[in-house]
Image: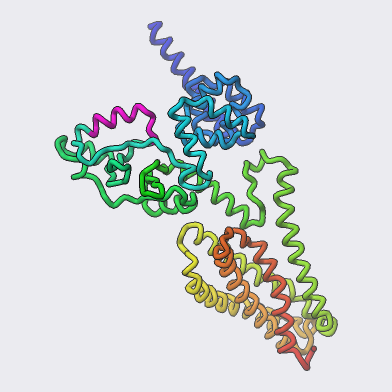
């Protein structure tokens, strides 16, 4: 009876610790660094290890950076080579990176050094060099026994086993389900799949995420320039990458530099710096709107009524341009649209711009024509003003749609990030040109009447 009671108490205590770990995960982003360290120290070793392995490299480094070397070693050696490379890259300076690297066992150190030779945002920088290797002439029984041995070396994933030639080139792949369901005397070469998707070590992480999304895989082999398999990239690695890339793109689309940290953790000064740059560029761009208005000062003086519709005209163009750029940037990020598709996009967006512009222009014209006090507000030539507004809206929406959809293609062609064609940037460009379109239409339609 006493033993049962003790077991119940132990179970309750373990459940409480698990609840504490889950609660800490929910509150983690809102805690200061000192609070994080304090809360982390209260976890049991088992829960702390599990929690530590689920953190990002920056948080992992922050937690252990001030630990004694012996304690740092116990935490760093929990990590797979690719995760160890990430935490070393998160270190503040070269000396701290070397110190962390020295804590690893010789084999892991060699693997991490190989990973650190690659950039962080390509396949070589996020891959893991530990994976299950098989030979094509093995029997299924031999392969299963061999996998048991390999699994003890902390391989990254055991969803797939890769069949390699003596020179380490990929011959095929076999899943564990297929391996265990096959007859024990069958050869691996008889059950393996030879159409293996492979990625080069220098492939950008954003493209890797697209490949995972399209093919529904758990891992993809990485090959070097001589087509030798050097590692694997797993889905969980790319899931983090995809989130980071999407966050960066959303920031850029909003006209903000990537924050590179949770909103509440980045310093106020740093946030101002990241926002001020784009705002300054956009502000200077909007100055050209004032210049354009100054050029048409004579028309404004003769027909003050035109100023009433100026915000309506330029905002319609800016909104349509922002819509188009957002759609194309996201389509590019998902791999749905490539540079060679620019003409199809141009035709599609030009047609959309014409129809949307005609629709919005008609609404604007009807608003003027059927306004109860139209003559008092707009004068005797209200019908011509309605036509001017309708044509200007059509022109601005058409131009905004075309420019918003084509700007990402231009940036991609120049090897720049298409996300830089942010909604505020497109709106600023279209604001300037919208003024020109509006007053050009006014000169054509109202010449000899109001102008």
Residue 163 visible: no
Residue 200 can be seen, yes or no: yes
Location of the C terminus (image quadrant): bottom right
> Residue 355's spot in the image, x, y percent?
55, 78
Outermost residue toward the bottom in this view: 448
Give how far across and how far down residue 432 sits, in percent.
72, 72
| Residue at the spot 46% in from the left edge and 13% down from the top edge | 9
Residue found at x 67% / y 80%: 392
Q: Residue at x 63, y 49 (%)?
A: 258
Is residue 50 found left or right of 316 in the rendered image?
left
Q: Give the vertical position of 229 relative to 315 (above or below).
A: above
- Image location (x, y in percent) of residue 357: 60, 77
Is residue 375 found inside the magenta-colored segment of the image?
Answer: no
Colouring method of the image: rainbow
Looking at this view, is 106 or 141 the one in front? 106
Residue 261, image x and y in percent? Answer: 63, 42
Decide if residue 208 is on the left or right side of residue 442.
Answer: left
Q: Quarter-wise, where is residue 11 in the image? A: top left
């Amino acid at each position: 009876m006493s033993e049962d009671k003790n077991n119940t108490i132990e179970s309750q205590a373990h459940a409480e610790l698990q609840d504490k770990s889950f609660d800490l995960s929910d509150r983690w982003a809102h805690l200061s660094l000192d609070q994080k360290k304090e809360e982390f120290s209260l976890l049991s070793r088992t829960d702390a290890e599990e929690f530590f392995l689920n953190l990002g490299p920056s948080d992992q480094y922050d937690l252990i950076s001030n630990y004694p070397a012996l304690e740092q070693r116990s935490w760093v050696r929990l990590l797979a080579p690719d995760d160890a490379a990430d935490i070393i890259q998160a270190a503040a300076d070269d000396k701290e990176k070397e110190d962390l690297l020295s804590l690893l066992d010789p084999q892991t150190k060699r693997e991490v050094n190989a990973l650190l030779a690659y950039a962080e945002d390509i396949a070589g920088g996020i891959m893991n060099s530990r994976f299950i290797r098989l030979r094509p002439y093995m029997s299924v029984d031999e392969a299963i026994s061999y996998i048991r041995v390999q699994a003890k070396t902390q391989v990254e994933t055991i969803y797939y086993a890769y069949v390699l030639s003596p020179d380490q080139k990929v011959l095929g792949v076999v899943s564990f389900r297929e391996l265990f369901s096959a007859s024990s005397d069958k050869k691996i070469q008889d059950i393996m799949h030879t159409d293996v998707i492979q990625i080069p070590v220098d492939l950008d992480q954003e493209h890797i995420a697209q490949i995972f999304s399209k093919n529904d895989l758990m891992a993809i082999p990485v090959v070097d320039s001589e087509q030798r398999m050097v590692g694997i990239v797993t889905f969980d690695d790319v899931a983090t990458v995809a989130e980071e890339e999407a966050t960066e793109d959303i920031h850029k689309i909003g006209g903000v530099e990537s924050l590179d940290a949770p909103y509440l953790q980045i310093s106020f000064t740093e946030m101002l710096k990241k926002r001020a740059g784009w705002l300054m560029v956009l502000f200077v761009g909007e100055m050209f709107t004032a210049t354009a208005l100054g050029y048409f000062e004579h028309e404004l003086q003769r027909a003050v009524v035109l100023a009433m519709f100026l915000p309506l005209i330029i905002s319609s163009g800016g909104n349509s341009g922002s819509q188009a750029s957002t759609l194309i940037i996201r389509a590019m990020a998902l791999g749905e649209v490539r540079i060679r598709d620019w003409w199809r996009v141009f035709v599609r967006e030009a047609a959309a711009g014409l129809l949307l512009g005609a629709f919005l222009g008609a609404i604007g014209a009807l608003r003027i024509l059927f306004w109860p006090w139209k003559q008092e507000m707009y004068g005797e030539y209200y019908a011509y003003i309605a036509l001017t507004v309708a044509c200007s809206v059509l022109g601005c929406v058409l131009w905004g749609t075309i420019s918003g959809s084509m700007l990402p293609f231009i940036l991609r062609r120049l090897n720049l990030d298409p996300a830089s064609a942010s909604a505020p940037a497109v709106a600023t460009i279209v604001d300037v040109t919208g003024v020109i379109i509006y007053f050009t239409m006014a000169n054509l339609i109202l010449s000899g009447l109001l102008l």
